[in-house]
Amino acid sequence: MTARETGPGWARAKRALEAAFSGAGRPQVGRLSRLGHGLASEVYTAHVELVPDPEGRSGTYAASVPARGSAPRTRASWQREGDLLERVAARTRAIRVPTLTAIVPVDGIDVAVRSYLEGVPLDLRAGQQRGVAPWEAVARVAAAVHAVDAGDVPGLGGHATRRAHALSEIAVLDGVPELREAERWARDHLPDEEPSALLHGDLLGQNILLHWEEPYAVIDWEHAMRGDPAYEMAIVTRGARRPFQIDHGLTRLLDAYAAQGRPRIEAPAVHLYELCLLGRWYREALEGEGDGEPPNQLLRHLENVLRRACAASAGRMIRASG
């Protein structure tokens, strides 16, 4: 649901939309609505009417301005995302992605103006959207993203192999006595030295838009990188006992992903990254930097994930020996 906005973010977004089309006629920016508010940015949308409009560019656009208190993204960062989205759009029709229209300086910061994609954010809770199984939606989107060859995207960060990604994440567990057992388990269950894949990096519900006629739209690619597909799943499940608020949520997600023709991801691979995420949040909480659960709750959460990880890896070994 959108909200009307009249504050500083609204003013910056309107000026950015006007400037983005200043060389293509006389832009008339309609009433703005705030589409979303994240940790890093606020997104405002409006219909832009160009007079004259020989190229047919009039339509609805979105402007992303920094959220209050957050560091603005650089022009280079926006341009890297734009280059990536251009390649994704050219290499898959399984998902829709926005197009970078312009990067406009407003009040000394760079504001990105992009095409607006219609859709309703995916609710990750089972049964909340009629006819939608959220684990299947996430699996379909993840499979489409991971299949895209992004090897020629300049400046795209990340890791060359799945193992390199895992080792980088496991480093957060090092040096904390309470995390020693989780670190030991993770190092004993490293992934193979297989090539990494393109990851979106934040496939939460607000970044997947459902449409009644079009493929899913995927927005907010700020965290895209090369890495281990299992990490993508851990960002969604976050160590929850019942992902998607349904029994066997992780198994359903991994089964649906494999059904898309992608190499199967096993549960222990996801648990590894869940442990690393929880370990990072635990360290941040100890240092007073986190804004989520207190340290003792995070530690209990991590210990529960570690128990599930041990059980899943033991079960896999039994199946393999049988």
Image (cartoon, helix red, strand yellow):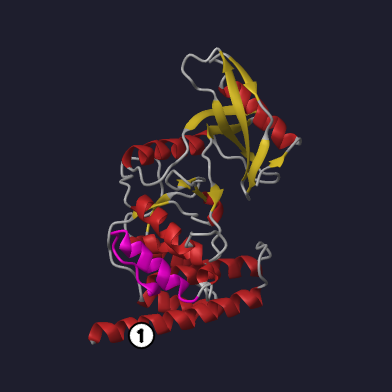
The question of residue 28 being in magenta is answered with no
Label 1 crowding class (10 Å Cα cut-off): few <14, some 14-19, many 20+? few
Furthest-right residue in this view: 7
- Secondary structure, mark 1, is helix
x, y percent for residue 269 = 38, 70
Q: Is residue 258 left or right of residue 116?
A: left
Q: Who is closer to the viewer here, 35 or 73? A: 35
Q: Which residues are magenta?
A: 247-268
Quarter-of-image position of residue 105: top right
Q: Residue at x 54, y 61 (%)?
A: 124
- Amino acid of disc 1: Ala
Classify residue 292 as left or right of residue 8. left
Residue pointed to by mark 1 = 314
Quadrant in which the C terminus appears = bottom left
Task: Check residue 263 for magenta coloring.
Answer: yes
- Residue at 57 percent of width and 77 percent of height: 301
Check the image and report above or below for 221 versus 235: above
Is residue 177 something that shows in the picture? no
Identify the residue at horizontal 45%, vertical 36% (top origin). Answer: 82
Q: Position of residue 72 (x, y in %)?
A: 61, 40
| Residue 304 visible, this orientation | yes
Along the line of sight, the residue nearer the viewer: 174 or 84 = 84
In the image, 251 versus 301, the foreground residue is: 251
- Residue 251 location, x and y as percent? 41, 72
Depth order, front residue of 240/293: 240
Q: Is residue 293 above or below residue 313?
A: above
How many numbered badges does the structure rendering display? 1
The residue that appears at 36% across and 62% down in the rendered structure is 257
Q: Position of residue 120 (x, y in %)?
A: 55, 48
